[in-house]
Image (cartoon, rainbow, N blue to C red):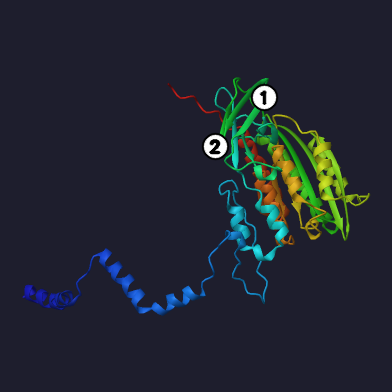
Amino acid sequence: MYVWATLLLCLPGCRQEANRPKLEPTSQARAAKRVTDFEDAPSIHKTAALEAPTPWRNGPETAALPIAKDRAPAPTPITARDEDAEPNSLLRDLESTQAAIPKRWLQRVAKLQPRRTVLVLDAAGSPVPMAVVDVRHGDKLIWRGRTFSDGKMRIYTEMAPGAPGPKAPLLVTTEHWGTRTAAVSSSPQTTLRLQRKAPPRVHRLDLCIIFDVRTSARPAVTDLVKGISAQLRRLKDTFGDLVMRVSAVAMMSSQNRSTHAVLPFTTDTQAYEKSLRWLIKTPLTGGEARLEPAMKATLDQLSWGRMTAKIVVLVTDGAVMEQDDAKHPWSTAALRFGAMGFRFWALVGPRTPVHGQLLLRQVSHFSRGRTMPIPGSNGRVSQTIFDAVTDELKRWSQPKPTPKAP
């Protein structure tokens, strides 16, 4: 009796399985779905083809973006990410905010594209930092710079007047520890190998913090200095053999007046903290200081050490960006930072305009640093500076590669 009851319960399920439609293979189903979609809506594709913009004739930089004329485009916020991972990320960001900034900013930013890279290694195969590299085309010197902590230097041939094409053969020369190495190459990356072995490395750091803020932001900057001093003391505990020198540049802006003062390098962290507090609280006097002379004076006055990791951190609230570009050419500062092997980090405030954010990203991209938004609290700002310094020191003291067996 139980067997017959079970069979009666299974009959409805068997009837449903028999009425189920037969399944088709996946490839056939996809092909049928594509044909059905195109057959059902042919007018939509024709309308999209008629309304599509005209193709680019002279490249993407001449194409107009589909932005309504009755409203301004929303500014694109800057997020924290690694600029070295995507070399063309700068140009992609420019396409999204092209209509929001003048053309003179775009022309200046779009030129900074690395064409070639030079890698300097010692006899053991380890990267050689701070090696002076000369690039010549024939008898003309078109570029001179220093390698970073990873032994690489980027060559921006478009920034040099009368530079050759991207595939022209160039003479690359370096001289370090009394040995001279040269190579003629037209490839994107050129490797120069020295004959001597690099000396043992010691953690050496030159840190310069530039405060470019309005006069009304002095109390907030004073609180920020306390967090920075605590992080500097934490660096000495993290790296026992660290030889660190710190300096600062204070640039205060009030209406149409801008002044600056320079604090020279010192190894005494406590004295640096006291001097920086006094420098920020004391009213700065003097004539109007343009950004380019101030940057040049800073780089010339500060005695940067050799075989040393160099980091420049800019903390700004957008005060300097509100003025004309002729008074504050960031491209000149970018060239000087990149050619001298500096890492440039920019902490940008929320009041900074869009073109100011793009120019700061240009400087950080050129010097292989980062541009990040200022967090809400001063503690997070000092922590960001600590992370930047720690990251650079780890790159500087990277382990040497072990030679492979023949």
Question: Residue at (7%, 72%) from the top-left corner?
Answer: 3
SS type, badge 2: loop
- Horizontal relation, residue 35 to residue 319: left or right: left
Residue lying furthest right = 286
First-in-chain label (2 vs 1) = 1
Question: Residue at (79%, 56%) from the top-left corner?
Answer: 325
Nearest the viewer among 270 and 301 is 301
Q: Residue 187 carries which label?
A: 2
The answer to whether any part of residue 375 appears in the image is no
Question: Residue at (88%, 59%) from the top-left corner?
Answer: 256
- Horizontal relation, residue 218 to residue 349: left or right: right
Marks 2 and 1, how far apart at CA? 23 Å
Residue picked out by circle 1: 176
x, y percent for residue 282 = 91, 49
x, y percent for residue 226 = 77, 47
Residue type indicated by callout 2 = Ser
Nearest the viewer among 164 and 303 is 164
Examine the rendered structure and indicate whether residue 232 appears above or below residue 211: above
All told, the count of numbered labels is 2
The answer to whether any part of residue 88 appears in the image is yes
- Horizontal relation, residue 42 to residue 57: left or right: left
- Horizontal relation, residue 298 to residue 33: left or right: right
Residue 336: which quarter of the image? top right
Residue type indicated by callout 1 = His
Q: Decide: few, some or many residues near mark 2? Use Cα within 10 Å; few <14, some 14-19, many ≥20.
A: some
